Image: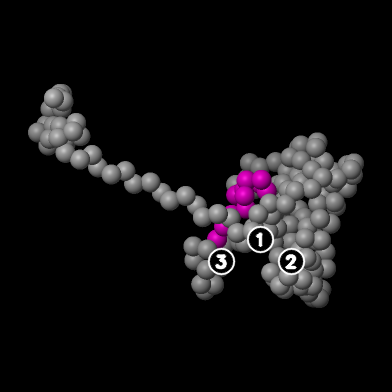
Amino acid sequence: MRCCVSRVLTPLLASSAVAGCGGAKAPERTTTAPAPPLPADLRAHHSATAAAGRAAIVAAAETAITDDARARARRGEFRGPVLRTSCKPRGRPGEPTSGPVVVYSCIAISFIGPRTTSAPRLVSGQPFQARIDFVARSFTWCKYVPPGGEGTGRRGAERGPPAACGGVA
């Protein structure tokens, strides 16, 4: 025979304590379902370079992303043409923009607008995110699907980049 002793002072709490000792079924625990697997087009790609120096390593990452984006455009994953790729340090608050490992926001540029003012030209294309390890001369990049804006109808479909590509800070 199983006995439970409760030192709870109030009758309401005492009855729930006894119920948890085998007098009644334990409440079922609810767990969150695991995240669905990452779609193939959002998975991380990895490469290394023999390039020396930060600018050369970033240029190698931009070239790799351009090659990947062009292959994706040929497969019809997004609209091309892909002209080139531009990467800049992500630089969120508290995140390093220099150091041995830096996360970059990149865009595989498919359109460059005309210059109309002294402002930078408008560019559009497919966003990517890259994590560059300057010491190892290696980089990992992922296609990035940013959250939908107003009226996109994509509510809840956003997927942040995997941790291998720098994740979401």
Amino acid type of the residue that numbered disc 2 sits on in the rendered structure: Arg
Q: Which residue is mark 3?
A: 148
Contact flag, marks 1 and 2 (Cβ < 8 Å): yes
Magenta part of the protein: which range?
158-168
User: At 49% across and 66% down in the image, what residue appears?
Assistant: 155
Measuring from the top left, give residue 110's x and y in whole percent: 77, 70
Height in image: 82 above or below 56?
Answer: below
Residue 11: which quarter of the image? top left
Measuring from the top left, give residue 91's x and y in whole percent: 69, 48
Cα–Cα gap, marks 3 and 2: 21 Å
Neighbourhood count class around disc 2 (C-alpha, 10 Å): few under 14, some 14–19, many 20 upward: some
User: At 41% across and 49% down in the image, what residue appears?
Assistant: 32
Along the line of sight, which residue is nearer the eye, 113 or 166?
Answer: 166
User: At 79% across and 43% down in the image, what residue appears?
Assistant: 138
Height in image: 139 above or below 63?
Answer: above
Along the line of sight, which residue is nearer the eye, 61 or 32?
Answer: 32
Q: Earlier in the sequence, mark 1 or mark 3?
A: 1
User: At 73% across and 43% down in the image, what residue appears?
Assistant: 102
Measuring from the top left, give residue 8's x and y in whole percent: 15, 27
Cα–Cα gap, marks 1 and 3: 18 Å
Taking the view exactly as shown, the residue that stands out farthest to the front is 1
Q: Earlier in the sequence, mark 3 or mark 2?
A: 2
Q: Which residue is mark 2?
A: 72
Q: Secondary structure at mark 2?
A: helix
Q: Nearer the viewer, mark 3 or mark 2?
A: 2
